[in-house]
Image (spheres, rainbow, N blue to C red):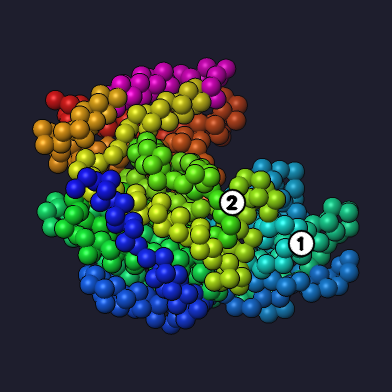
Amino acid sequence: MERKKIREDLVKQLSLDTVLRETETISEDFAWRLSGTKIAEDAAKYYVDYMKKNGVDAKLLTTKGYLNVPEPADLKVVSPVAEEIRCAACAQCGSTPPEGITAEVVHVGPGGVNDYIGKDVKGKIVLAELSYAPPRPEKTRIAIANGAAGMLLMNWGSDESEYLGYGTVKSPWGNPTPETISLMDNTPPIVMITRKDGVHLRKIIESGEKLTVTLRTHAEREWMDIFLPYAEIKAPNGDGDFVLMTGHMDAWSYGASDNASANALCMEMAKVLQANRHLLKRDVRFAFWQGHENGIMEGSTWFIEKFWDDLDEHCVAVFNFDSYGLWKASVWHNEVAAELKPWIVGLDDVIIDEGVGRDYVRTSRIGDMSFFGIGIPASFTWMFHTKEEIAGWCNATLGEYYHSDADNMDFMDKDVLAKCMKYGPSYVFDLALTPVLPMDFVPVADEILNRVNDLTDIIKGRPDAIDLLEMDKVKETALEFRDKAAQLETLRQKAVENHEAYDVAALNHALKQISRAILPMTCTVTGRYEQDTYGLSALHYVIPCSESIRTLVSYPENSHDYYVWSTRAKRDRNKITDAVRHATTIINQTLK
């Protein structure tokens, strides 16, 4: 049977009524399923039991996470006029003395690096606005670096919005290491407040009056048990390679769209694939993460470290489903690895409904996108709103009610969920059915070349940096990779058209190995074996470690800082040529 027909038939077998029913069960019977709690444990066991009842080989994985379940907090305006402000302590925030801390408040806008320029916040409490530019944990890291004594995070949404959001402020990704634990120990007290109250406080500051508040929090971290439902669907004639389907399962409050709906869909997909496993070319595995909401990706990071060898050898791609069914959403959003994008876009040309917008961006370090270091390409999808709607909600990319008590079944959009159930699973099904992996490295090479050109422009006019970094040689290496990637894509297309005439197993292995070589360089600062902090500002760029080159040329030649950063920049430059040469070697061996 034709692959397209099989894929479409599998999608049709997914039951919207079943997914809605299970979304309601998860969100209402297991509300406040924060990691480390009994409710989260019960929810995880429910997932496993549900899949087993439907014939799926499922089990519960357990580990420990350094977690915090937030306790109530207090925020009071001392001057200019005494008043109480409704607030919620952020997970992983620091504690105040029992009497709290009293300090002046300084507004820092989105709370990015440049928002602190010219502002003295040492010993003061900063007022920042929720956004992904940067995310909460990176706002926290930046606030700590600037000496802030605390932070008030005003929710996104319209200026009159009274939704009180929840969230974490932990910046170390995964469980802490000896190198990152200090980032947690130094976290100040941080609370969320509503957008309406945040605007009220901001206007006081903008009026020129001194705003002073008393903030009280109490937070304790513990090593808690976390539970990860896990399932495998075996292809009868597979070679051990697999697609990994993921999504976090812990939640604030009801968490209907975040993330009960996607979890329910994944369980439905497992059921359908189990019944049709005889059609699969490769395995499909399902992992549901804890340690997401009141930690930062402890579950997915542990999973990588625990199953490193198997993932490195056999995982072809990771798909992450989150926030499916957002009320009145109309734009299909995909954060996708460059090597997967041509295949994704081509498939979307077939499956996306008329009138649905499409938005593609390169993969970013949010959600449980923990697989950049190991070098596994990924796709992270949800359906969100138009740019105009998001702008009207002060960049609320996940809706005004995100992480609030209002994320319940009343805001679950059945029609939007039905579209998500068609789009996201189509990727997973298609990849499980196709003999030749759909990885095209020409777009990856173009990304690298564009970044190398940008770096060359950054050092223009600095003969010292030009001599030090020899970016012309980096460009030569990148151009060779681009040429070889085009030849490889020609070979891959021939194998797609007639896979029986080619050694598909060897070709697929090479495609995986190129991703392993390139992704840690293009998408991380810390490299293959570590995890960058959540939302680190440098990760905005292709080859994020190369931002050290920008820092280098900000210092005058022969200064102390110049020499320190010249060492860092040269090492980061070498990471580019090393990874690109390695990938080119793999291609050359494949083309023989």
| Residue 250 visible somewhere in the drawing | no
Element at label 2: loop
Q: Which residue is labeled 1 in the image?
A: 160
Give the CA distance from mark 2 to mark 1.
Answer: 19 Å
Q: Which residues are magenta?
A: 457-485
For image coordinates 78% across by 68% down, the residue present is: 213
Q: Mark 1 belongs to which amino acid?
A: Glu
The image shows residue 28 at horizontal and vertical percentages of 50, 78
Task: Rate crowding at label 1 as few (under 14), some (14 to 19) or many (20 or more) other CA atoms within 10 Å.
Answer: few
Please tell me the numbered disc located at residue 275: none
The image shows residue 539 at horizontal and vertical percentages of 49, 43
Vertical comparison of 371 with 292: above or below: above
In the rendered structure, the answer to whether residue 217 lies left or right of residue 321 reads: right
- The front one of 580 and 337 is 337
Q: Which residue is labeled 2 in the image?
A: 385
Quarter of image, res 498 = top left
For image coordinates 64% across by 60% down, the residue present is: 400
- The front one of 192 and 388 is 388
Asked if the stretch drawn in magenta spans residue 468, the answer is yes
Quarter of image, res 411 = bottom right
The image shows residue 44 at horizontal and vertical percentages of 37, 75
Between disc 2 and disc 1, the foreground one is 2
